[in-house]
Amino acid sequence: MVRVVRSLLLGIVLALGLGGLAQAGDPAREQSTKADPFPVQLGGPFDLIDHNGDRRTEKDFLGRHLLVFFGYANCPGICSAALPSMAAAVDGLGDAGEQVQPVLITVDPEWDTPEEMRRVLSEIHPRILGLTGEEEDLAAVREAYQIEFSKVGDDIFGKPIYSHGGYVYLMGPDGTLETILPPILSAEAMAEIIRGYIVPPSNEVRQGT
């Protein structure tokens, strides 16, 4: 079932993500898919521990957008590209970036202690928040997002290497999925798509003034 959902997501993500790229810089960008519900419902409640050791639930982030990625702090693969892109995208949003919280949810709680996540993520960007927790709680979040992962080996230091999903999930202020960003996007393209969800279209601004 998860593989079926992932195949469906791939088609949706490529269609919407690349469509967003085509609209970047287009005066008609306000006619994007923002108003359309995302055709797959993912996400939900969670109860985890952040990299400062504090308990975090989805209620802590209501009213803000979440930019969610599943991986692990010392990942040598897609994480090393996705996390800096997320950070750069948030920076590229300027003041609007304050409305977006970038989050890494670990698939490796054994090595990703709060202290280790704080150390690694602080070097990427001070705004990225690492979330870990008990395996049961992490498994519930992975199921909610239809995340698969598997261990593929160990590095030269004996730390596990995982294969895992590479999508970035933009969650709305009410906790619902707004869109999924493919890992092929540049930080600039990612910021441009996100901006369409957090900044009112220019015609709405004019009507409200």
Image: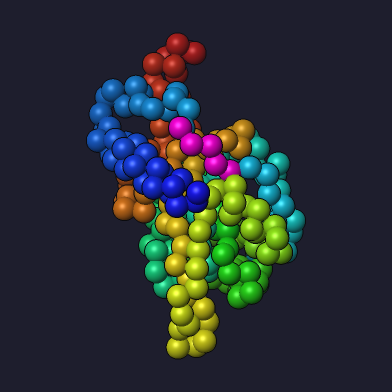
Q: Nearer the viewer, residue 124 or 13?
A: 13
Rendered view: 31 above or below 16: above
Q: Is residue 40 magenta?
A: yes
Residue 29 location, quadrant: top left
Left/right placement of residue 69 relative to residue 182 reads right
Q: Residue at x 70, y 60 (%)?
A: 136
Colour scheme employed for the rendering of this structure: rainbow
- Residue 64 x %, y %: 59, 38
Q: Nearer the viewer, residue 205 or 175?
A: 175
Q: Residue at x 35, y 26 (%)?
A: 32
> Residue furthest toward the right?
55
**Can residue 50 be seen in the rendering of this structure?**
no
Rendered view: 179 above or below 132: above
Residue 104 location, quadrant: bottom right
Main SS of residues in magenta: loop
What range is drawn magenta here? Answer: 39-43
Left/right placement of residue 57 relative to residue 120 reads right
- Residue 11 x %, y %: 34, 42
Q: Residue at x 58, y 54 (%)?
A: 142
Q: Residue at x 68, y 64 (%)?
A: 135
- Residue 189 x %, y %: 32, 44
Left/right placement of residue 6 relative to residue 46 reads left
Badge count: 0
Rendered view: 53 above or below 16: below
- Residue 194 x %, y %: 42, 39
Q: Is residue 120 magenta?
A: no
